[in-house]
Amino acid sequence: MEILFLKMLLLLAGCLVGLFYHLSDLCVGEKRTVQNKPNFIVILADDVGWGDLGANWAETKDTPNLDQMAAEGMRFVDFHSAASTCSPSRASLLTGRLGIRNGVTHNFAVTSVGGLPLNETTLAEVLKEAGYITAVIGKWHLGHSGLYHPNFRGFDYYFGIPYSHDMGCTDTPGYNLPPCPACPRHSAATSHGRDCYTKVALPLFENITIIQQPVNLTGLAAEYAEKATQFIQCASESGRPFFLYLALAHMHVPLVLAQPPSSPSFPEPYRASLREMDALVGRIKDKVDGCGKENTFLWFTGDNGPWAQKCELAGSVGPFSGAWQRQRGGSAAKQTTWEGGHRVPALAYWPGRIPANVTSAALLSTTDIFPTLVSLAKASLPPNRRFDGSDVSEILFGQSHQGHKTLFHPNSGAAGKDGEIKALRLAQYKAFYTTGGVKACDGSIGLEEHHQPPLIFNLDQDIQEQVPLDVKAGEYQAVLPAITRALTDFLQDIATDNVSTADYSHDPAATPCCNPQHIVCRCQASCSSCNSEP
Ligand SMILES: *[C@@H]1O[C@H](CO)[C@@H](O)[C@H](O)[C@H]1NC(C)=O
Ligand SMILES: *[C@@H]1O[C@H](CO)[C@@H](O)[C@H](O)[C@H]1NC(C)=O
Ligand SMILES: *[C@@H]1O[C@H](CO)[C@@H](O)[C@H](O)[C@H]1NC(C)=O
Ligand SMILES: *[C@@H]1O[C@H](CO)[C@@H](O)[C@H](O)[C@H]1NC(C)=O
Ligand SMILES: *[C@@H]1O[C@H](CO)[C@@H](O)[C@H](O)[C@H]1NC(C)=O
């Protein structure tokens, strides 16, 4: 009891003393008080598995902080990312719209000219307009060139990498499958490693400036925690509400670790990385607890399921094995519309508002974050477009248990055309019109198959998606018309919506590079020529 009290006192002191001055410019600019608006923190993990959360899956023992957050908040067990791959999932989180509407249907590359279409409105833009101070810390992956950069998409502050942490070499290549080489140091060195980007080093940005290239990944988790706590600190003192979007480099492939493998208690790389992520989330939660938890809503989730082709360097899908697909070869995780591809861990924490230690089985999606936060901020949704998400605050506050009736799972780089809806959920039923096409750990790529009529699984009885309902069975015949109608209505809704188109063209000049004359753009914080042109 006394220890707990002491800890609380320390946390409180940490907040009041204001140990950090670095970011203070951001918060003192216009000192105005915007009352009655809660703060928002959305923590998005990369390629985290549903089974990577100990609270979801008892076999996992590496997430004590997240499990604690679950015990003090609401845990969702039927919560889905809006796509099964990075850029589309993030675009949907920040717009409340699926890729088929917002235009982001597959990943952006290092040389991509475009990004999230400029006439899409981001959550940060809406909240900034409503008086919020906004920051994104971590992985962006929605376009890094020109006006696609986060500082022009509603974020006052940006600190992080423009895309995934394996999209560019570093000096400590760490763990990957296949292994990747370090950045070359001489022009004579040739790049090698089939799936490795070695032409350009991974850059680290602060606002529009590249401050390090290659980034030192070893200290990145600690730096993210530092910047995030500084931001929470200064924003809390400013009298204005804040929105922090913390898009972690974890899990993806673990790459560099805080602890050397030679240390005696060192677990395998993925688990070590999971612990590192958990500790980072714990630091953020501690900061929130010290700085006004009664007014801060913290939401933790993932962008899509584990990257199965990375084998032991990928996370756990828990019970969502996608057995039907696995029996035929190919992956049933990231990039697929099997449950393992898009059912993600999700926790909501807001002591006093969101009930503690509650599990919700409501069918929800990352597209719900946008309308929910907009509503809690008493702001308005951007006009002239439709949204896939809804305001789910009543579910969060324990006043309702009713989630979505239907959820549409876009194709995310697997079989078929990107962004197309090839799988959907209707209550406990899951229908597939296309399956296959994604590489598994064993190298197999399941044959792309089209199903007309669709495969239908009853997830209440078959969470592994192992045996589809018999087409002739009464249950199949009973549910098929509703599934067909749901898809037809959805496509009709899209056809009459204002939809955007992303520019997916490439130009080597779009590559973020702080010093183009230098091999792999080697550039450190002290470098005076580290400016990238916005
Ligand atoms: C980043 O940009 C914000 C908003 O313009 C500014 O207040 C802040 O000082 C900048 N931070 C750094 C480190 O440049
Ligand atoms: C990278 O960061 C780690 C941890 O902060 C530090 O120990 C190491 O010296 C850094 N490496 C380089 C090359 O700066
Ligand atoms: C949370 O609920 C479970 C049962 O639903 C109970 O066993 C556990 O003790 C509770 N934990 C806390 C911290 O209240
Ligand atoms: C599409 O935008 C136009 C204005 O540009 C607007 O009149 C129309 O209502 C919008 N459609 C939808 C579905 O919101
Ligand atoms: C974005 O711009 C395109 C092209 O002008 C338009 O067709 C589309 O409706 C716009 N999207 C939204 C959401 O307004």
Image (spheres, rainbow, N blue to C red):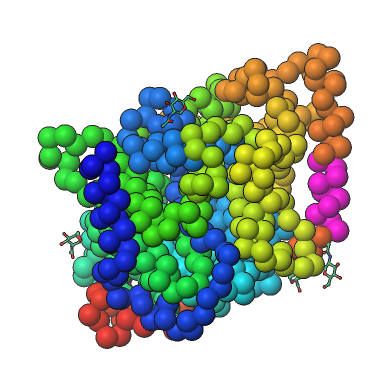
Q: Is residue 420 above or below residue 121?
A: above
**Left or right position of 478 against 349:** right
Residue 132: x, y in percent? 54, 71
Ligand 2 positioned in quadrant? bottom left
| Magenta segment boundaries in residue numbering | 487-496
The magenta stretch spans residue 142 = no
Q: Is residue 233 above or below residue 468?
A: below
**In which image quadrant can residue 468 be found?**
top right
Residue 251: x, y in percent? 39, 46
Q: Mark yes or no: residue 255 visible.
A: no
**Left or right position of 334 against 181:** right
Front-lying residue, 270 or 174: 270
Name the residue at 34% across, 48% down.
282
Residue furthest to the top in view is 473
Residue 375: x, y in percent? 67, 59
Q: Mark yes or no: residue 258 visible.
A: yes
**In which image quadrant can residue 209 be found?**
bottom left
Name the residue at 62% across, 39% down.
398
Name the residue at 30% across, 51% down.
8
